[in-house]
Amino acid sequence: MARADIIKAAAQKDVQEQASQPKNKIKLGALGALCLLMAVFLQLSFVLVLIGMFPTAIAHLIDNTKNRVKYQCVLACNISGLLPFVAELISRGNEKQQIQALMSDPKTLFVIYASAGFGFLLVNASPYMAAWFVKSINVRKAKYIYQVQEQLVEEWGPEIMQTLPK
Amino acid sequence: MLEEQFDSGLRKLLETYKPRRGLDATPIDGMPDRFSIDLDRALPYLDSEGAKAYEAEDLVNPSRAVYALICSLDYPQYYAALEKMRGIAHPSLLVLHDYSVVHISRLNENRLVLFLEKPQGVQLSDLIARGQKFGDTQIIKMMLTPFLEALELLRDLGLSHGRINPNNIFIGDNKITLGEFYSEPPGLSQPFVYEPLERITAEVYAKGAPNEKTDTYALAMIAFELCHGIARFKVVTKQEFITRITMLGVYNVLAAAYDVNPNFSDFFRGTLIDNRTERWGLREMRTWVDGKRYNIIAPMLPQAARPFPFNGIEYYNVRSLAYGLSRYWRAAGIDIPSSKLDRWIDIALHNPDMGDLVTRSIKIGARDGSSEKSRNEMLGRIIAILDPQGPLRTKDLSLNIDGIGAAVAYFMIKGMTTELELVLDLLNADMPNFLASLSDYGKTKYFTDLIWQMQRERTVLQVNAIGFGLERMIYDLNPSLPCYSPILRQYHVTSKEDALFTLDALARTKGDKTPLLDKHLAAYFASKINLTKELRMASLEKMPSLKNNEELKILLLLNMVQEKAGKPRLIGLATWAAIRMEAMLENIHNRRLRRLIKKDLKTAAGTGYLSYVLGALIESKITRQDHIGFKKAHAIYQYNSERIKTLENQEMFSDLSHQMGGRLAMILAYLILTVTFYIVVDQYVLRH
């Protein structure tokens, strides 16, 4: 790559970073507002949410992809694991003893973290599933095209396979 | 493949076809119910250079003595005379009863055979050899008068004999007969002593058509021989004889050796001269035979005041110099440009016009860095200027203008390519026109027509296409020459109709494998239909492989010939053509179309018309359809190939799997969340 191109690419990156800085600020602000809202609404259960959403925070940190698939999967699964416990706490009046009893039960964090782990598993296993699916479709398509090619060769001769002079 | 499984049935059609005019229709060793040839009894004294004589029997009239002349394939016969002489009866001419192409069993070949009246008596040459004396009256009344009548008859037919010599004159009881003259090119076997200068100096196969003055000359020489004998001239070589008569003139050479019979002096002085314009013809001979006497002075050659030395010989007249130059061609090519020949002509011969022409011709020799070609042209022009009555000369060749046709045919038959090249150089330099423009005889209609034709042949030679070129020129200049195509040669075909029917009959044995790609065949037919433009197939514009296919062009030509011959039905030839075209079908890409065309070909061949056979392939609709279809199919094939590549690309497949897998995982995760959310809401909110 030429020096000019490298400089140009670096400049573009700078521009992108500068453009993303206000977005990050908005995101942080929104997250802060959400946390404040949840703290008000959930009161003591918010502590459980903070501890329970730990895997999501990790996923957020390690997933640098554009679509953030891993993060989103872990988030959805993590919430799925956390939600019944939060609902249970809220339905029982959000009391300190309840929270302590729940937090002291290893099953609680195990279920919450296991559901987040399932999210990780889902993200890593689904490409294999998709590959199997796509492959079966491709094989079928290719088989059909090969048949068409054979028919063309049969009708027009093997010279059809050659590149025509311009 | 589609078409490989399909048999067109053309070969089966050929196997079952019986031609209208089969090859077995050619008579064997005779003409059915007319003549039979006895191949065991040769008659060598009746042979000519171009034919062998055999005893024959007249089956209709057994008392009539006939003999057969089996013509050689090595020389073109004198067809113009053959046509006119059939059945002509004259007491002093052998009657040509008939002629036909006959299958000669011993040669296993078809040959042209002439059936002639067998001459009675002995050859004049035998009588001369025995020393028999002839009186003046006997010579005039018994020989010259009847021969003059015979020659007058020939003149009325537009012919001359050209082969009057003692070997070809037969003397029987009160009957004298001239032998035939049409079984060989004119004058081929005529001994040089009986030929006038302009014909002796030409090659024996290129003397050209004889004229009445050729015959009067020969008669005068025979008369001279009967009066005085010319044995001393018969022992000298041809070159020596020519040298003597060009130096002194033929009459002076003869008169110097003998005291000329005064009763014949007018005849000899009027006839035995080297100037063809001044020589007696039949009219003058008739008045002399009828008794008129002229008191002609002995012919003299104009002699120069001082000689022109060349190659160690001193020349006193232009004609002898012309012969000397042609005889010592290489030396002349070196000497003449610096020899001041033009000055000699100007001063010693007092002919400044001729001198100017020679000067201009010498300049031609200096052109192109004195290449052999331009040197040949220069010498040819100089000799033509010096001897405009003589033949055209080039290196080692002398050809009369009207003998060029026979010469090229002879060279072609004998495979003499170097000589052919020399003739082509002569034609390209327009030498026949140059020579004719210098002489009086060259301005007659016969010669102007010939010159025009030769000029036209120059363009024929330049066209590099089927039906043109050297072979075409040979057939154009020799309209009666049989076709020398390897396919037809042994069948001796002499007309386009014959050629078509022979090909039709040959289809059964040759049609399966023999290509119809033959230059001679194409040139022969092109000449017969006077093809003037290169054959083009506009409908095959999109298919260069077919458009430029030479065999297809020959088939197109054959179709034109069939049309011009009155559209005879030729199933054999049409099937042969269809088989050949079947091989060309590989140029049609679409296998279904090929199969359809194959089917069509069989139907078309069954009609016997080449136009239908050709139509099956070269119809523009079909070829366009194939061309466009192939392009489309090719595009689809290439597109599909790219698609297969994409489908089988592991890298792309992996990326796609990841993308899809990610989406699938997200869908499943959010689905789980939705279900959980629903359950939680259902359990804790809706139930309380």
Image (cartoon, rainbow, N blue to C red):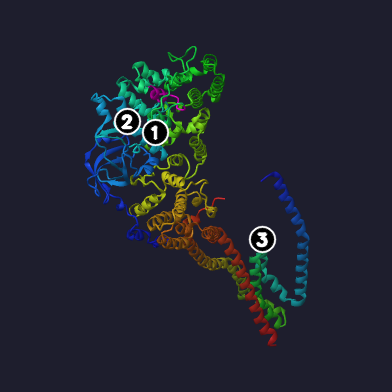
Which dot marks residue B141? 2
Mark 2 and mark 1 lie on one chain; the one further toward the N terminus is: 2
Task: Kindly identify which chain the residue marked by label 2 belongs to.
Answer: B
- The one nearer the camera, B211 or B654, is B211
What residue did someone put label 1 on? B416
Left or right: where does residue B165 sit relative to residue A116?
left
Callout 1 touching callout 3 (CB < 8 Å): no
Q: Nearer the viewer, mark 3 or mark 2?
A: 2
Q: Which residues are magenta?
A: B265-277
Residue at left 24%, top 23%?
B131
Residue B33, image x and y in percent? 26, 51
Q: CA distance from mark 3 to mark 2?
A: 134 Å
Residue at left 52%, top 45%?
B532
Residue at left 22%, top 47%?
B62
Q: Quadrant of residue B54?
A: top left
Give the SS element for disc 3: loop
Q: Is B274 colored magenta in this rendering?
A: yes
Q: Residues within 10 Å of mark 1 (few under 14, many from 20)?
A: few
Q: Residues within 10 Å of mark 3 (few under 14, many from 20)?
A: few
Q: CA distance from mark 2 to mark 1?
A: 46 Å
What residue did someone put label 3 on? A64
Left or right: where does residue B472 sit relative to residue B366?
left
- The one nearer the camera, B322 or B465, is B322
Q: Nearer the viewer, mark 1 or mark 3?
A: 1
Q: Quadrant of residue B284?
A: top left
> Which amino acid lies under the numbered mark 1 shown in the image of this protein?
Met
Task: Kindly identify which chain the residue marked by label 3 belongs to.
Answer: A
